[in-house]
């Protein structure tokens, strides 16, 4: 929250969130401060839901509707390099990007998520079959996110090439790449560690529902 007050979207003194069509994530200035939760409730509305990182337990009246143990990995030995076959993706590509996300389920990707940073893709016979891009950007760092490959094109190293290409752009800005995944996704963790990422911490991801109203019943994590 301190790094991105306002979260790129609606903000309150002690809570922030992205615009709902950019990212579902919200943040609290201080999870131990009831005023932060009051500000978050004002942002999401009665019964509204939002995923948070690093919150162990919501206060009385709030409901936990989902929780996922995660891992955060940082680039320590990644061979960052351009991928000649990769193409830049933008707003015109969003329908294809959303379709690939729906098929592979790497985490939330919404109609305006592409605005958060550089997104690269690989096409096969004109069809988007793999992609990766940038999301969170605290000072000095950039998160790599939405890494996915069509099931029919896995095993060819497409995701690895895209991660290296996105990382190359991040490094050119003098920033360090990092990424998140679920702790249970051991295959992804092994892949990322094999190409030069190192485990940094184990954050908790939690979706909470505000008191009052019915709100949404589901929330997705990255």
Image (cartoon, helix red, strand yellow):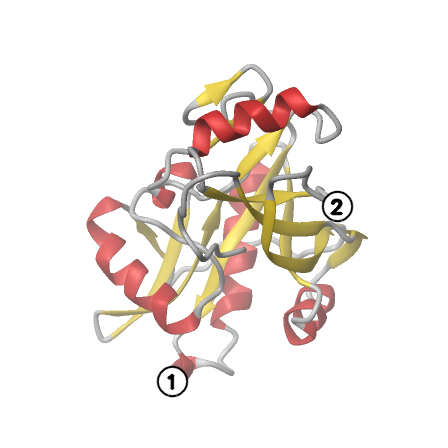
Residue 191 horizontal/vertical position (percent): 66, 71
Q: Residue at x 46, y 59 (%)?
A: 83
- Where residue 134 appears, as percent x and y from the top left, is 49, 45
Residue 137 versus residue 118: which sits nearer the camera?
A: 137
Residue at the (43%, 43%) spot, across then down:
23
**Taking 57 as reference, is 161 left or right?**
left
Q: Is residue 72 left or right of residue 164?
A: right
Identify the residue position indicated by label 2 in the image: 56
Q: How many marks can you see?
A: 2
Q: Please, is residue 132 above or below residue 178 in the view?
A: below
User: Compared to 59, does 107 lie above or below?
Assistant: below
Q: Position of residue 189 (x, y in %)?
A: 69, 67
Residue highlighted by disc 1:
152
Note whether residue 126 is visible. Answer: yes
1 up-or-down from 212: above or below? above
The C terminus, quarter of image: bottom right
Q: What's the CA distance linking mark 1 and mark 2?
A: 39 Å
Residue 4 visible, this orientation: no
């Amino acid at each position: 929250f301190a790094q991105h007050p306002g979260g790129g979207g609606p903000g309150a003194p002690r809570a922030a969130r992205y615009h709902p069509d950019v990212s579902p994530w919200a943040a609290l200035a201080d999870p131990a401060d009831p005023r932060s939760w009051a500000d978050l409730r004002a942002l999401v509305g009665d019964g509204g839901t939002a995923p948070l990182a690093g919150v162990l337990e919501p206060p009385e009246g709030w409901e936990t509707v989902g929780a996922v143990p995660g891992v955060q990995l940082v680039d320590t030995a990644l061979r960052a390099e351009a991928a000649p076959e990769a193409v830049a993706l933008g707003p015109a590509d969003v329908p294809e990007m959303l379709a690939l996300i729906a098929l592979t389920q790497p985490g939330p990707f919404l109609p305006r998520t592409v605005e958060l940073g550089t997104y690269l893709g690989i096409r096969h016979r004109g069809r988007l079959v793999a992609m990766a891009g940038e999301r969170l950007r605290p000072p000095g760092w950039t998160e790599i996110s939405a890494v996915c490959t069509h099931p029919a094109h896995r095993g060819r190293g497409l995701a690895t090439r895209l991660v290296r290409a996105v990382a190359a752009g991040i490094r050119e800005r003098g920033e360090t790449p990092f990424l998140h995944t679920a702790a249970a996704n051991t295959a992804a963790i092994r892949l990322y560690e094999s190409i030069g990422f190192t485990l940094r911490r184990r954050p908790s991801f939690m979706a909470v529902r505000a008191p009052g109203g019915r709100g949404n019943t589901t929330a997705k994590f990255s």
